[in-house]
């Protein structure tokens, strides 16, 4: 189905246009999606398709089914979710609030959406187990986000 898009990504009325069809949209928090810096491949709109229990994501979260040697050397294991590598440095706004806003954003996604799959841009689609994988990834990221917020408040 083709979904015509018009309007601003910061307008809640625009973001909720298709909720009656089971399509929910959320803008990643803590980063600028309207005028992102050129290195920001982190900010995106996550789309939840409720009937299929699938999240569609551009760049905030990635999934690799079979990582090659180079990716494994970079710490990305096969069958794993990861936050985009530009996330903490160039993706999040350079404020103490940004990491905590992103943390809350992911907590809300986990709490509010009953998903099992995730389709990520550029790489692979995780069928089954995506929510548990995101919870695991997020739990590992919480200390980093809190440390980043603290370091930016000085």
Image (tube, rainbow, N blue to C red):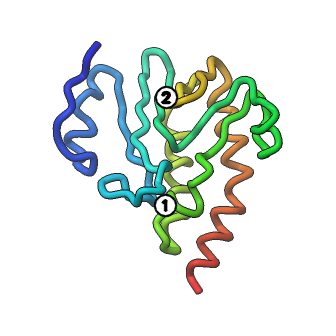
Which of these two is toward me, 33 or 130?
A: 33
Res 135 label: none
Mark 1 surroundings: few (<14), some (14-19) or many (≥20) residues within 10 A = some
What SS does tag 2 mark? strand
Residue 118, quarter of picture: top right
Residue drawn at (48%, 48%) of the image:
41
What SS does tag 1 mark? helix
Which of these two is toward me, 116 or 30?
A: 30
Q: Is residue 114 left or right of residue 126?
A: left
Residue drawn at (63%, 70%) of the image:
148
| Residue at the spot of label 1 | 101
Establish if 54 lies above or below 24. above
Which of these two is toward me, 74 or 32?
A: 74
* Location of residue 100 in the rendering, given as x and y in whole percent from the top left corner: 54, 64
* Location of residue 12 in the rendering, given as x and y in whole percent from the top left corner: 25, 46
Specify which label sits upstream in the sequence, 1 or 2. 2
Q: How far is the residue under mark 1 from the one under mark 2? A: 20 Å
Q: Is residue 6 left or right of residue 152?
A: left
The residue at the far top in this view is 1
* Location of residue 146 in the rendering, given as x and y in whole percent from the top left corner: 65, 67
Residue drawn at (78%, 38%) of the image:
70
| Residue at the spot of label 2 | 55
Q: Is residue 45 left or right of residue 2?
A: right
Residue drawn at (26%, 27%) of the image:
18
Establish if 60 lies above or below 22. below
């Amino acid at each position: 189905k083709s979904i015509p898009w018009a309007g601003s990504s910061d307008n809640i009325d625009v973001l909720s246009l298709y909720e009656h069809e089971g399509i929910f949209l959320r803008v990643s928090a803590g980063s600028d999606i309207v005028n992102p810096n050129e290195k920001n491949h982190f900010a995106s709109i996550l789309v939840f398709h409720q009937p299929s229990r699938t999240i569609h994501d551009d760049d905030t979260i990635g999934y690799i089914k079979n990582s090659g040697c180079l990716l494994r050397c970079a710490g990305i294991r096969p069958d794993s979710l990861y936050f985009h590598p530009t996330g903490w440095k160039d993706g999040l706004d350079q404020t103490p609030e940004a990491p905590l806003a992103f943390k809350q954003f992911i907590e809300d996604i986990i709490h509010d959406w009953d998903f099992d799959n995730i389709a990520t841009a550029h790489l692979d689609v995780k069928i089954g187990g995506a929510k548990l994988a995101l919870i695991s990834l997020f739990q590992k990221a919480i200390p980093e986000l809190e440390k980043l917020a603290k370091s930016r408040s000085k």
